[in-house]
Image: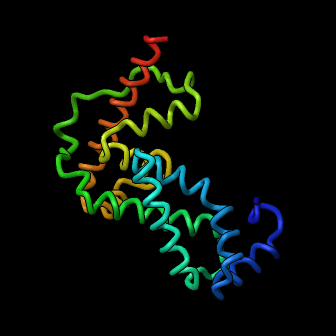
């Protein structure tokens, strides 16, 4: 059901009914958002079981905070922030960056090789990203996909900006190596 794409009146009505606790409206929101939010959770968590747990937690949070949605801006964008924060809280709880190094110790890594990403399909690229270690995957997702700046990543994850840069540099180098390895096998 593409509830939020076409009819803004229906969209507003559904949000309001969901705020009142209407289960059908909540299900409509779930049905509309769950595919995209699951993909987001899977990108951050890297494993289906963990992504499903974060998806569930994200919807619990979304419905608990639904009254705080003012109706200004995109509902999907508002929801996306909830799911990103839920994934980050889960990753922080598991201390994903405990073995992080600062950018100065990662200078020897290079991701400047010609990009092989153009030859990959979306699903194959997402699979390779999911294979990254959690710290690399998280920073890569936040920077390259979600558009966070290093200072925002550092604040969200409780790390230094240098560590964020280091994790991104290492993630890019590892992605490049994995992509080249897959191309050699073809």
Which residue is drawn at the image coordinates 76% and 73% (left, top)?
A: 11
Position of 161 compared to 84: left or right? Answer: left
Please give left or right for residue 112 compared with residue 28 in the image.
left
Vertical arrangement, residue 140 with respect to residue 157, above or below: above
* Colour approach in the figure: rainbow
Number of marks in picture:
0
Q: Is residue 38 left or right of residue 73?
A: left
Front in this rendered view, residue 1 or 173: 1
Q: Quadrant of the N terminus?
A: bottom right
Relative side of 161 to 184, left or right: left
What residue is rendered at 47% in x and 49% in y?
42
Residue 170: x and y in percent read 29, 36
x and y percent of residue 78 in the render?
A: 57, 69
Residue found at x 51% / y 52%: 40
Indicate whether 179 appears above or below 98: above
Where is residue 171? Give x, y as percent: 34, 37
Among the 4 quarters of the image, the one containing residue 168: top left
Q: Residue furthest bottom?
A: 20
Height in image: 104 above or below 152? above
The image quadrant that residue 3 belongs to is bottom right
Residue at (56%, 34%) from the top-left corner? 123
Image location (x, y in percent) of residue 48: 45, 47
- In the picture shown, does residue 71 fall above or below 27? below
């Amino acid at each position: 059901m593409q509830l939020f794409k076409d009819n803004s009146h229906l969209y507003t009505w559904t949000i309001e009914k969901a705020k009142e606790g209407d289960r059908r409206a909540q299900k409509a929101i779930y049905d509309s958002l769950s595919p995209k939010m699951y993909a987001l959770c899977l990108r951050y968590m890297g494993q289906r079981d963990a992504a499903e747990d974060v998806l569930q937690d994200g919807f619990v949070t979304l419905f608990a905070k639904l009254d705080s949605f003012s109706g200004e801006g995109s509902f999907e964008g508002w929801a996306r922030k909830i799911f990103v924060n839920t994934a980050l809280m889960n990753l922080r709880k598991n201390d994903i960056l405990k073995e992080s190094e600062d950018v100065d110790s990662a200078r020897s890594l290079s991701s400047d090789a010609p990009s092989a990403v153009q030859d990959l399909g979306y699903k194959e690229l997402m699979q390779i990203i999911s294979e990254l270690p959690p710290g690399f995957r998280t920073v890569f997702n936040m920077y390259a996909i979600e558009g966070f700046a290093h200072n925002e990543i550092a604040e969200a994850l409780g790390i230094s900006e240098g560590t964020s840069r280091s994790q991104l540099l290492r993630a890019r180098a590892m992605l490049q190596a994995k992509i080249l390895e897959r191309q050699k096998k073809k």
